[in-house]
């Protein structure tokens, strides 16, 4: 059997000159391809020395660093399953993920070791390590004693490479299971579709615990053997400074909005740039147009999901990149638009987007029923996005059938936040809606009604949420009102609330 290990494919794309720079960090460090080869071997040997069962999960909540990338690649190399967790998650959120995924290994920042190890102990996780963004931590201490030679584990294309938690419209988060074959097929398609070539340099400024930064950007550079300019945090000034040394940049729309506010963003600064990619949330047409006017470059917008990696893209060449659209289905992806009851829709009509292809995930972790619900009888995955295909084949996303807010590229599930608010003393009911926000695209607004006789304080509600949940989930405003608008069935009409509060951040 040919080894389908994603790491093996990425490794095969390393340039012949292993001493060339693979990654340059914003604090002046450089890592060669040989460094990546050796350090991933050492860490893979460490993981293998732990005698983990096949399919063991390696859960990771650490700050962005090259060593965190090494841990990701080593997990693939050793044949285990990588489970990245947003650094903004607090203990309640982490407790759920760890309890659900039952990882064999948990890697966290040393400052969180106290509470994380308690959670790990409860979930039966035997191996807890620390990894900090200053190249310290018990993980590196232990790996330093391991051999720098390692034969990558032999994997089948359907073997799991990663689990990415993504929330449901109701209930708790679901772990999307992605295989080596899912991720490799997507990386190869994008390499070709986006014209990656020798000499490309990527500015990597996204977090590495979600699809965009971990797969689209990182795999993109690695499978092409391209150098990365590595930024631990997105800083628009720093990106503008580094643009002349780069050819490719990827970002969520908020990154483009913030870059446009930099006076240094000029055609001259972008003189060596070949490609700007946007995705994870809708890119406003104003941003698309302003970018073109300022830099002379047309942003390429693409669309994907945690469950599917990339699905569609505007063309890199041989066609127009149309603002407001997400382009065409990628090669190998079959995309259709259907009614709720499964009837195909003609071109131009709006319906649910369904997809099929080698990149579509293997199902939700330990949720076979939920998985079954999300697929049609003929094997298409129901994305929950609503859109249309025009006569030229361009796909436009016009909304979502799932109740979801995307704020600055992060997903916020109203049901989760409403659940926490509804549990607060004195709260009768609440509704969270997303409204336009100039920086984050969409921002959450909580509208709350009190139980008879109870007095509620909006600031207190927000403070309580802040002490429990990841910061990006906290509504930007909270209103205590007397009633919520309802339809004849008694259901809260969120569209009316969205309309009422749409000018809040204008
Ligand atoms: C930070 N804050 C936010 C967000 N980020 N609020 C709403 N939405 C956000 N995304 C809040 C913090 O709680 C804080 O509030 C204040 O803003 C400043 O926080 P700070 O940490 O300084 O913000 P930042 O570092 O400037 O972060 C903004 C950011 C970041 C750079 C836009 O959110 C980001 O990196 N977003 C990218 C997310 C991403 O990679 N998504 C890809 C998902 P306070 O001061 O009140 O505490 S992958 C995906 O969707 C797929 C499948 C795809 O298609 O790619
Ligand atoms: P996630 O659950 O983080 O994988 O987010 C996936 C969701 O992000 C999709 O289902 C879409 O709703 C949204 N999304 C991703 N890219 C785009 C885009 N270019 N335009 C509009 N929505 C997008």
Image: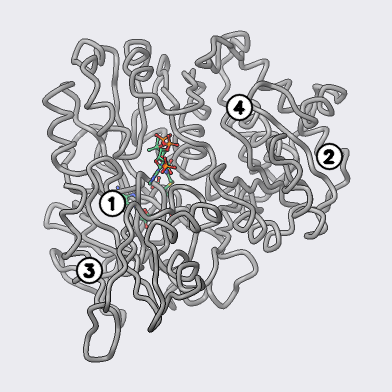
* Residue underneath mark 1: 442
Q: Quadrant of residue 128?
A: top right
2 or 1: mark nearer the eye: 1
Among the two numbered marks 4 and 2 on one chain, the one whose residue lies closer to the N terminus: 4
Label 2: which residue? Answer: 48
- Residue 165's image quarter? bottom right
The answer to whether marks 2 and 1 mark residues whose Cβ atoms lie closer than 8 Å is no
- The residue labelled by disc 4 is 12
How far is disc 3 from disc 4 in space, using C-alphas? 53 Å
- Point 24% across, 21% down: residue: 262
Q: CA distance from mark 4 to mark 2?
A: 22 Å
Q: CA distance from mark 3 to mark 1?
A: 14 Å
Say which residue label 3 marks.
497
As displayed, is residue 461 above or below residue 3? below
Q: Nearer the viewer, mark 3 or mark 4?
A: 3
Residue 234 horizontal side relative to residue 33, left or right: left
Marks 2 and 3, Cα distance to the nearest angstrom? 53 Å
Report the residue at 30% width, 84% height from top.
491
């Amino acid at each position: 059997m040919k080894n389908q290990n994603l790491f093996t494919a990425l490794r095969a794309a390393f340039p012949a000159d292993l001493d060339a720079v693979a990654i340059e960090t914003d604090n002046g460090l450089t890592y060669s391809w040989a460094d990546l080869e050796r350090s991933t071997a050492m860490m893979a040997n460490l993981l293998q020395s732990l005698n983990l069962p096949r399919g063991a999960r390696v859960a990771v909540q650490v700050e962005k660093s090259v060593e965190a990338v090494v841990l990701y690649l080593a997990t693939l190399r050793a044949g285990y399953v990588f489970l990245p967790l947003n650094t903004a998650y607090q203990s309640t959120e982490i407790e759920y993920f760890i309890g659900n995924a039952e990882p064999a290994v948990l890697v966290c920042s040393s400052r969180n070791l106290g509470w994380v190890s308690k959670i790990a102990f409860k979930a039966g996780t035997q191996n807890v390590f620390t990894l900090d963004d200053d190249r310290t931590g018990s993980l590196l201490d232990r790996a330093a004693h391991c051999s720098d030679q390692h034969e990558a584990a032999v994997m089948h294309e359907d073997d799991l490479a990663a689990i990415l938690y993504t929330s449901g419209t109701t209930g708790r988060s679901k772990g999307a299971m992605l295989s080596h074959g899912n991720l490799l097929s997507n990386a190869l398609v994008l390499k070709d579709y986006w014209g990656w070539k020798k000499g490309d340099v990527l500015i990597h400024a996204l977090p590495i615990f979600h699809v965009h930064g971990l797969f689209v950007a990182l795999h993109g550079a690695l499978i092409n053997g391209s150098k990365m300019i590595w930024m631990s945090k997105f800083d628009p000034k720093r990106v503008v400074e580094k643009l002349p040394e780069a050819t490719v940049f990827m970002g969520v729309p908020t990154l483009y909005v913030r870059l446009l506010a930099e006076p240094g963003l000029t055609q001259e600064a972008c003189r060596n740039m070949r490609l700007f990619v946007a995705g994870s949330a809708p890119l406003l047409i104003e941003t698309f147009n302003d970018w073109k006017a300022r830099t002379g470059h047309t942003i390429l917008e693409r669309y994907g999901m945690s469950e599917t990696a990339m699905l569609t893209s505007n063309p890199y060449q041989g066609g127009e990149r149309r603002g407001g659209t997400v382009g065409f289905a990628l090669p190998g992806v079959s995309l259709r638009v259907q009614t709720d009851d499964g009837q195909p829709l003609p071109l131009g009509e709006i319906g649910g987007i369904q997809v099929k292809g080698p990149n579509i995930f293997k199902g939700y972790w330990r949720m076979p029923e939920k998985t079954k619900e999300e697929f049609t009888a003929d094997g298409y995955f129901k994305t929950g996005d609503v859109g249309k295909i025009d006569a030229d084949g361009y796909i436009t996303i016009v909304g979502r059938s799932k109740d979801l807010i995307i704020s600055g590229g992060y997903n916020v599930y109203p049901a989760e936040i409403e659940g926490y608010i509804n549990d607060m003393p004195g709260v009768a009911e609440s509704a969270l809606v997303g409204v336009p926000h100039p920086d984050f695209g969409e921002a959450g607004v909580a509208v709350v009604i009190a139980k008879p006789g109870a007095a509620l304080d909006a600031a207190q509600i927000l403070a309580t949420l802040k002490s429990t949940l990841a910061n990006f989930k906290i509504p930007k405003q909270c209103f205590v009102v007397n009633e919520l608008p309802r339809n004849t069935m008694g259901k809260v009409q969120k569209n009316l609330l969205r309309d009422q509060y749409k000018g809040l951040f204008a």
